[in-house]
Image (cartoon, rainbow, N blue to C red):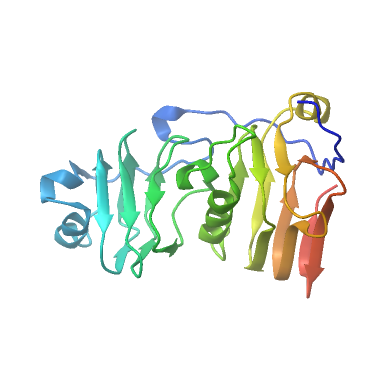
C-alpha cells in the first residue's frame, strides 16, 4: 500500500487465541441445557417467545427478520451458523442480553436499532458487515459495533485488517472500549493493518464526547493530515500509549 501516512500506534496487543468452535476470539459463552434452531419454532421471534426463561442454545442457521421490538434475555445463547443472521426492520429495536457465538461474518443487519448488554467479552465490526479490505467503507459497521458495546463493558475489537473510514468514529457515554488486535507496530505499518482515513482532512478520525471509564488502545491510523482525537467533557477516559 503506497500511501503517505501519519501513524499513531497506541499499544501493541498480544493476539488472542482464536477458537472458532467457541465463536469469535475472546468470547466464552456458557453451555445452556436445551438446544434447537430458530426455524424449529417457525422463526426467531417465535422461538424467543416460546422458549421464555428456559436456559437454551438457539441456533441461527438462516436469515430471520425482526419486524417488532424484541428483547432476547440472558438465558439464551445465540449460536450463529455461517448463513444465519438477524435483520432488524426500520423502526424496530432488537435488544440482546444473550451470549453470542459467531465467527467473523455478518450476523446483525437492517435499518432498525440494535442494542443491549450481550454476554460476550468482545464485539466485532464484522458482525455488522465490516469487510476490512482497505477499499470498502467500513465506517457504519464499526460505528454500529461501538454503539452495541456502549455501557456494557464490552470491547469493540478490530481484527488485524485494513479498515477504510470516510467519517469520524464517535465514542460517547460510559464504558466505551475500542481496541485493535494485531501484530507489533512494525508489521501493522508494513501491511497497512488499522484504520485508513479517507474522510475530510479537517475532521478527526475519532471523536470523543462525554466519555467516562473508557479506553482506546492498539490503534494504527493511516492517512494524510490525520486529526486523531477530538475530546469533549472527557472523564477517566484513557488513550493508551
Name the residue: 40% across, 38% down.
102
Name the residue: 76% across, 63% down.
237
Name the image quarter holding the N terminus.
Answer: top right
Name the residue: 35% across, 65% down.
90
Left or right of 111, for residue 130:
right
Residue 36 place in picture, x, y as percent:
18, 42
- Say which of 103 and 229 sits in front: 229
- Say which of 210 and 140 sits in front: 140
Residue 116 place in picture, x, y as percent:
44, 63
Left or right of 117, for residue 232:
right
In the rendered view, tell whether residue 90 sits above or below residue 32: below
Residue 136 seen in the figure: yes
Examine the image and state in which quarter residue 81 appears.
top left
In the rendered view, tell whether residue 241 sits above or below residue 210: above
In the rendered view, tell whether residue 111 sits above or below residue 220: below
Residue 124 seen in the figure: no
Amino acid at each position: 500500500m503506497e500511501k503517505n501516512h501519519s501513524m499513531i500506534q497506541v499499544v501493541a496487543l498480544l493476539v488472542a487465541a482464536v477458537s472458532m468452535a467457541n465463536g469469535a476470539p475472546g468470547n466464552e459463552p456458557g453451555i445452556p441445557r436445551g438446544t434447537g434452531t430458530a426455524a424449529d419454532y417457525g422463526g426467531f421471534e417465535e422461538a424467543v417467545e416460546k422458549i421464555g426463561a428456559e436456559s437454551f442454545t438457539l441456533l441461527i442457521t438462516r436469515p430471520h427478520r425482526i419486524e417488532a421490538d424484541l428483547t432476547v434475555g440472558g438465558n439464551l445463547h445465540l449460536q450463529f451458523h455461517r448463513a444465519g443472521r438477524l435483520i432488524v426492520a426500520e423502526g424496530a429495536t432488537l435488544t440482546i442480553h444473550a451470549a453470542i457465538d459467531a465467527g467473523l461474518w455478518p450476523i446483525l443487519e437492517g435499518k432498525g436499532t440494535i442494542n443491549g448488554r450481550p454476554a460476550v467479552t468482545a464485539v466485532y465490526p464484522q458482525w455488522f458487515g465490516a469487510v476490512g479490505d482497505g477499499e470498502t467503507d467500513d465506517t457504519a459497521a464499526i460505528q454500529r459495533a461501538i454503539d452495541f458495546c456502549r455501557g456494557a463493558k464490552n470491547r469493540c475489537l478490530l481484527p488485524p485488517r485494513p479498515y477504510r473510514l470516510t467519517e469520524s468514529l464517535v465514542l460517547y457515554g460510559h464504558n466505551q472500549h475500542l481496541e485493535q488486535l494485531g501484530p507489533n507496530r512494525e508489521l501493522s505499518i508494513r501491511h497497512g493493518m488499522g484504520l485508513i482515513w479517507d474522510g475530510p482532512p479537517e475532521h478527526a478520525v475519532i471523536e470523543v464526547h462525554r466519555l467516562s471509564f473508557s479506553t482506546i488502545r492498539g490503534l494504527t491510523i493511516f492517512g494524510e493530515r490525520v486529526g486523531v482525537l477530538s475530546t469533549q467533557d472527557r472523564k477517566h477516559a484513557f488513550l493508551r500509549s
